[in-house]
Image (tube, grey):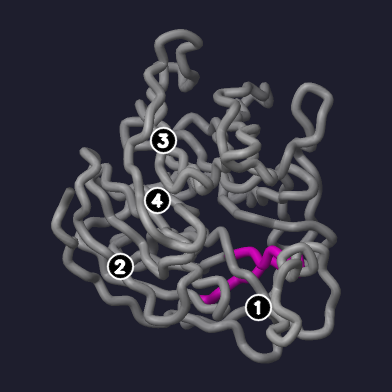
């Protein structure tokens, strides 16, 4: 439908050092993903980086899903462990007041104290039941938190959900029956909520009411972008100041930049592996895109044509 968009090259910003690569620890997350692997080709998972987020000092934080570690990466690229606990952290976002929120697949929404490394539960269930497995989230300008509850939902089990946790603590179900909701983002005006639906290999567009919810009738939720290819599907999602969408296409080693009309503008291609899972804008003027390439344990970076939209943490 469209010509191939121009390429933007990436380079390695930081790489997990050998001292932090795990080789001898058990992990339920790892064991689950080893099922079905050929006996003569055992899978070794030393880490799986996800959920990058910047603080106001320019430090980059990310999670390590299988071994429940939270890393701080200094502007010079050095890794340090700031927390390690029993769980499966999937993503991390920073509140305007400095609090760090962790989306944990096992436990729900957690709070992280970056100084002590203490991780405590904030929201563990909805309507008296545990979440399926929280994946990613985004703050609105009023402090409301939108998040995806993916679990193992897929095309044959379209039971994924999208929630809003209001700033006053009220939890609201926004959307259900989603086959694999993953990355999530708001457009700059916060009139639209975008959700990457991994198992359908597409991106959904959800119109929002002025107060941030959706209409129960006539909401006109639909597919915004239909992707093709990859061994997985769209994962992380970010929006720039122009309202363009940067979409991590995990399993294809690519981040796509689409206009707010859905036109392909650029392909940002991984210089390492194909598991481009999540991303965040940062650097001077927020003109650099930082991407987790999870299989190699690296953070890639790419110079972008437009700055990223300022998140709640920097307002």
Residue 30: % across, % down: 75, 69
Q: Which one is in front in this view, the residue at disc 4 or the one at disc 3? A: 3
Asked if disc 4 and disc 3 are in contact, CB closer than 8 Å, the reply is: no
Q: CA distance from mark 1 to mark 4?
A: 25 Å
Q: Secondary structure at mark 4?
A: strand
Front position in the image: 152 or 270: 152
Instruction: In the rendered view, tell whether residue 285 sits above or below residue 153.
Output: below
Q: Which residues are magenta?
A: 62-74
The answer to whether any part of residue 142 appears in the image is: yes
Q: CA distance from mark 2 to mark 1?
A: 27 Å
Q: Secondary structure at mark 3?
A: strand
Residue furthest out toward the top: 217
Residue on which disc 3 sits: 204
Q: CA distance from mark 4 to mark 3?
A: 14 Å
Q: Name the chief secondary structure element in magenta.
A: strand
Label 4: how many Cα within 10 Å (few below 14, some 14–19, many 20+): many
Q: CA distance from mark 2 to mark 4?
A: 13 Å
Residue 166: % across, % down: 60, 26
Q: Which mark is residue 80?
A: 1
Residue on which disc 2 sits: 268
Residue 183: % across, % down: 50, 47
Residue on which disc 4 sits: 238
Q: CA distance from mark 3 to mark 1?
A: 36 Å
| Res. 289 image quadrant | bottom left
Image point (56%, 33%), residue name: 178
Q: CA distance from mark 3 to mark 2?
A: 21 Å
Q: Which one is in front in this view, the residue at disc 2 or the one at disc 1? A: 2
Image point (59%, 82%), residue name: 16
- Circle nearer the N terminus (3, 2): 3
């Amino acid at each position: 439908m469209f010509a191939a968009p121009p390429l933007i090259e990436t380079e390695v910003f930081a790489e997990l050092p050998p001292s932090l690569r795990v080789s001898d620890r058990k992990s339920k997350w790892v064991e689950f993903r080893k099922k079905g692997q050929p006996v003569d080709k055992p899978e070794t998972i030393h880490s799986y980086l996800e959920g990058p987020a910047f603080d106001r000092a320019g430090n980059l934080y990310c999670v390590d899903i299988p071994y429940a570690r939270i890393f701080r990466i200094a502007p010079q690229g050095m890794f340090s462990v700031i927390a390690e606990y029993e769980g499966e952290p999937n993503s991390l976002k920073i509140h305007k007041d400095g609090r760090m929120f962790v989306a944990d697949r096992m436990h729900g929404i957690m709070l992280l104290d970056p100084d002590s490394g203490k991780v405590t539960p904030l929201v563990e269930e909805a309507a008296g039941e545990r979440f399926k497995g929280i994946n990613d989230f985004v703050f609105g300008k009023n402090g409301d938190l939108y998040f995806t509850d993916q679990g193992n939902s897929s095309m044959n089990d379209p039971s994924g959900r999208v929630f809003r946790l209001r700033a006053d603590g009220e939890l609201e179900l926004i959307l259900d029956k989603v086959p694999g909701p993953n990355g999530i983002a708001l457009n700059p005006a916060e009139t639209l909520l975008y959700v990457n639906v991994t198992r359908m290999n597409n991106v959904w567009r959800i119109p929002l009411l002025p107060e941030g919810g959706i209409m129960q009738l006539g909401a006109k939720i639909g597919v915004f972008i239909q992707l093709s290819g990859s061994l997985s599907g769209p994962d992380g999602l970010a929006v720039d100041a122009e309202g363009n969408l940067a979409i991590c296409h995990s399993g294809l080693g690519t981040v796509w930049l689409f206009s707010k009309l859905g036109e392909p503008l650029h392909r940002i291609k991984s210089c390492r592996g194909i598991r481009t899972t999540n991303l965040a804008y940062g650097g001077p003027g927020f003109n650099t895109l930082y991407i987790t390439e999870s299989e190699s344990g690296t953070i890639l970076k790419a110079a972008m044509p437009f700055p990223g939209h300022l998140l709640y943490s920097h307002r």
